[in-house]
Amino acid sequence: MGYTHYWNTKRDFTTEEWTELQRLAERLFENYGYLLAGWNGEGEPECDGEDIRFNGIGHQSHETMHIHRERLGKPDWVLQEDYERDGEFNFCKTAEKPYDYVVVQLLRGAKMIAPDAIDLDSDGYVFEDLKERV
């Protein structure tokens, strides 16, 4: 497979939670912008009222980190009861490239800001302390 972070969005982020998550994303973009580009490895990371989206730069890019304020909806192949219980499944495979650090910090921040809105998992051990505390 590859080094991947997974999250299930259990509910939409509230306006207040999303505003706080946007602030965190902007701080991360300011501090680690030298690692980050837009979704395709070029341009600037994006952060607005609906989405936060970024990747690594050029050959240091892998898969786009994309988190939505509102869930996109249940795919046809997912059972309704599974969607209601588990939430909306998302992932970002970073291959441990340098932008991975920002992906992890953003997801950790989302869990701290809205603990009941998002569940986290990873091929690494980057979320173990959050699983125990939250």
Image (cartoon, rainbow, N blue to C red):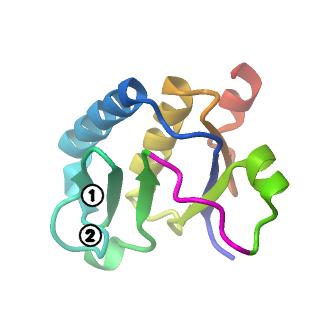
- Write down the region rendered in magenta: 70-76
Kindly indicate the quadrant of the structure image that contains residue 49: top left
Q: Residues within 10 Å of mark 1 (few under 14, many from 20)?
A: many
Magenta stretch prevailing secondary structure: loop
Judge by depth and name the residue closer to the eye, 39 or 70.
70
Question: Does residue 8 appear to the left or right of 49 in the view shown?
Answer: right
Question: Does residue 31 appear to the left or right of 66 in the view shown?
Answer: left
Counting from the top left corner in percent of width and height, residue 109 is at 47, 32
Residue at horizontal 64%, vertical 29%? Answer: 116
Disc 1 versus disc 2: distance between alpha carbons? 6 Å
What is the three-letter code of the residue carrying label 2? Ile
Outermost top residue: 133
Judge by depth and name the residue closer to the eye, 10 or 95.
10
Residue at horizontal 84%, vertical 53%? Answer: 81
Q: Secondary structure at mark 1?
A: helix
What is the three-letter code of the residue carrying label 1? Leu
Label 2 sits on residue:
57
Residue at horizontal 34%, vertical 58%? Answer: 53
Q: Residues within 10 Å of mark 2 (few under 14, many from 20)?
A: many
User: Where, quadrant-wise, is the N terminus in this rendering?
Assistant: bottom right
In the displayed structure, 122 sits above or below 62; it is: above
Q: Secondary structure at mark 2?
A: loop
Question: Does residue 9 appear to the left or right of 17 in the view shown?
Answer: right
Q: Are dots 1 and 2 in contact, CB under 8 Å?
A: yes
Counting from the top left corner in percent of width and height, residue 118 is at 61, 39
Judge by depth and name the residue closer to the eye, 111 or 58.
111
Residue at horizontal 49%, vertical 35%? Answer: 110
What label does residue 35 carry, if any? 1
Whether the magenta-drawn stretch holds residue 75 is answered as: yes
